[in-house]
Image: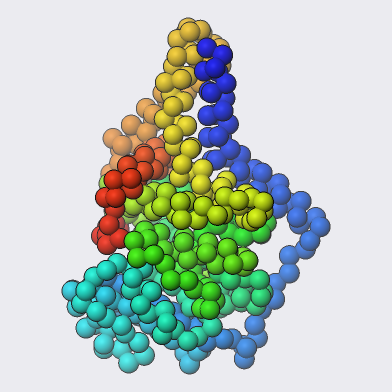
Amino acid sequence: METLKVLFWILLIIIIYTYVGYGVVLYALVKIKRLFKRKTEDTFSADEWPEVTLLIPAYNESDYVSQKMKNTMQLNYPSDKLKIVWVTDGSNDGTDARLKQYDNVELYHKDERKGKINAMNRVMPFVKTPIVIFSDANTDLGKDSIIHIVNCFKNAKVGCVSGEKRIVDKTSDAAAGAGEGLYWKYESMLKKWDAELYSAVGAAGELFAIRTELYQEVEQDTLLDDFIISLRVAQQGYTIQYNPEAYAIETASANVKEELKRKVRISAGGIQSVIRLHALLNIFKYGVLSFQYISHRVLRWTVTPLSLLLLLPISAILAANIGFSSLHFYSLFFWAQLLMYVCALLGWLLENNATSVKILFVPYYFFIMNLSVVLGFFRFINNNQSVNWERAKRAH
């Protein structure tokens, strides 16, 4: 029984640290850093702005072409310094045909579909601007996003800049929208502190940029191209900065089923990334970056979901040994876990009911997040996740 108690506390500490403790430690370290080093911002003057390429990989996105191009043309950046490049490999819904109507678009298209990263690898040698910005076809960018991104590169140590992913926030929302929106608000806060301490850990595929010269061709079966690209930039000794003023906005997944599909793929890609970026686990070589990478990413994709899975039966055994009706900590903790799972079940029952009390969906979304890691693990080891995938349906 003593062994179970030790295991219980180890698992509990891992879970608390992953979802709460790291944020607390990170904030404390940032506050300490602010005492000794004042943050300074250096920006380009208008005549110094460099040429940039906005690279938009798209597969069967004909429904979004008009809106994306309208949004792009409204971006506050000199048009003569903004190169617009689309790559539409494999699209068979007329995406490439619609883009040919625009004379300011450089279009690359092949009928064969080999996945997003293969399309990016194919086009990157043709990018000649010093900075390349990646953006999804189904997202709108904030008007000044490119300026905010480019200004971060004024610092020679910055090799990658991640924008913020924003979910359309409605007064009332169903489970997918409420859970995803709250999750990204918390994630954005952590990314901001990560970047202030040293470096963000990865970039949001909806909007991120790198120094073109730092791009390394990515393996053809890569699932999380944005994560691998950005972390490999960091491995070269540069930092990944996070600028929430540069943002991409999109609607939430249409429902939790679609969100689970998306997260299972991300989880499978996360496990693949941990293996391919194993060198970053060497804290003696990468220091603070390794600490951030392990705390913010690796734990979430590996031991923490397993810890949650084991904690319930272990706490049940400990509670049974003392008595389920006891007011002892182990008994109370067991019932608290059951209550959380009941709340998750309630979230499932109310999944498609819009509500302004979004906190009701937090346990459900948290459960879905960790379930996706377990499912993603089995998908990865069984090699069932194709690099070609269908985008999750988004809410209207």
Which residue is at a point 31% across and 84% down the rendered structure image?
107
- Camera-nearest residue between 381 and 337: 381
Q: Is residue 280 above or below residue 53?
A: above
Image location of residue 258, percent across then percent down: 28, 51
- Camera-nearest residue between 373 and 338: 373
Q: Is residue 48 above or below residue 377?
A: below
With 50 as the anchor, is 35 left or right in this view? right
Q: Is residue 391 above or below residue 107?
A: above
The answer to whether residue 8 of the structure is visible from this angle is yes
- Camera-nearest residue between 252 and 210: 210
**Outermost residue, right direction?**
36
Image location of residue 173, percent across then percent down: 36, 49
Which residue is at a point 35% across and 87% down the rendered structure image?
106
Colour option used: rainbow
Which residue is at a point 31% across and 37% down the rendered structure image?
348
Q: From the image, which quarter does the C terminus lie in?
A: bottom left
Which residue is at a point 48% across and 78% down the rendered structure image?
132
The answer to whether residue 141 of the structure is visible from this angle is no
Q: How many marks?
A: 0
Image location of residue 271, percent across then percent down: 42, 49
Give residue 22's quadrant in the image. top right
Image location of residue 197, percent across then percent down: 67, 56
With 79 as the anchor, is 9 left or right in this view? right
Q: Is residue 319 above or below residue 376?
A: above
With 247 as the anchor, is 265 left or right in this view? left
